[in-house]
Amino acid sequence: MSAYPALRLRRPRIAAWSRALHAETLLTPADLIWPLFVTAGDAEERIGSLPGVLRWSITQIVERAREARSLGIPAIALFPNTPEHLRTDDGAEAFNPGNLMCSAIRAIKDAVPEIGVLTDVALDPYTSHGHDGLTDDTGYVLNDATAEVLARQAVAQADAGADIVAPSDMMDGRVGLIRMALEQGGHPNVQIMAYAAKYASGFYGPFRDAVGSRGRLKGDKKTYQMDPANAEEALREVAADLDEGADSVMVKPGLPYLDIVRRVKERFEVPVFAYQVSGEYAMIEAAAAAGAGDRDTLVLETLMAFKRAGCSGVLSYHAPLAARLLGA
Ligand code: PBG
């Protein structure tokens, strides 16, 4: 009599030790990048749509950098909530070497030089209209003029000590301009992580509250961010950014776009990162609060999914929680 069933795939799942032995994918705190918001105020501020995430003062954000370091999280990503009176049509505060962002970078790099500091390159936290770039009279975001300003912004951040600059604006050609400006500015070793495939998404709402751009935003970002219908176009975006000198690329948002992560990884074989964005974080928190799922389980399962899809790492607001759950 032949054995039945021929295949017992359940056999290795019998106990935790065996499941550990057979795991194909590993998730560790070293896979995480923790996004942090900085405020000019001197106390932490709550963000209504992002429960559990705070804007930190410069003094406090240095403590968060220490915390990240002690949890084994290799890098943090910084975003400023620029004071109201410094937001202008041209977003010139973005390249002021004394701005909130640069001050935070300097303070962190002074106190915790071992932590990797990633900075967002885009104008939305600095413009009065909430767009990522300069606009013309009709509100259209100008490509080439914006890219020039972004290059100045990236150099200011690198001068302050940024290790990775991450353009999130989706202008064409900006990676090449930024690379050139960094070379000329004496920063040959500052990396560029390009937000290469960034979609015009409904999942960014809480982030816009956090950096104070939501109420100001006129219209939408569909003339520069990608259409969720498109995947081949994402591959062209990635090819362009790599060609222009990006060291790594990012896909954003995260979970709804894991097919893009996988296709980018298979086609280009370069480091790919994903951003589990604010709306995804909020969704997990809402599900947990409603009793629809267990927060810790959802966090670790979704982060593991990014790794399985091919990510080298993930930007996640749940990074410190995940690092603790992973035993850091
Ligand atoms: C803007 C930027 C956005 C995010 C990162 N950089 C928002 C946007 O494009 O409107 C979103 C991150 C998040 O939702 O967590 N340059």
Image: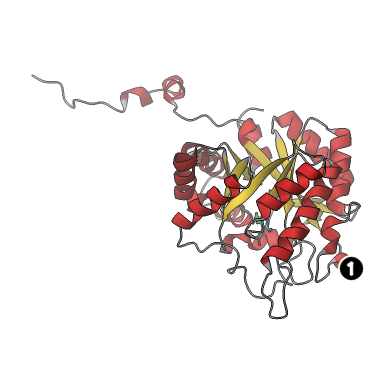
In what quadrant does ligand 1 lie? Answer: bottom right
Camera-nearest residue between 38 and 286: 38
The C terminus: image quadrant: top right
> In the image, residue 189 lies at what x, y percent?
74, 35
> In the image, residue 155 lies at what x, y percent?
81, 48
Q: Is residue 115 above or below residue 154?
A: above
The residue that label 1 is drawn on is: 85
Visible in this render: residue 162? yes
Residue depicted at x 68% and y 44%: 192
Identify the residue at the far left of this view: 1
> In the image, residue 82 lies at what x, y percent?
83, 60
The answer to which image quadrant residue 2 occupies is: top left
Residue depicted at x 63% and y 40%: 247
Q: How many marks?
A: 1
Q: Disc 1 marks which amino acid?
A: His
Residue depicted at x 84% and y 49%: 156
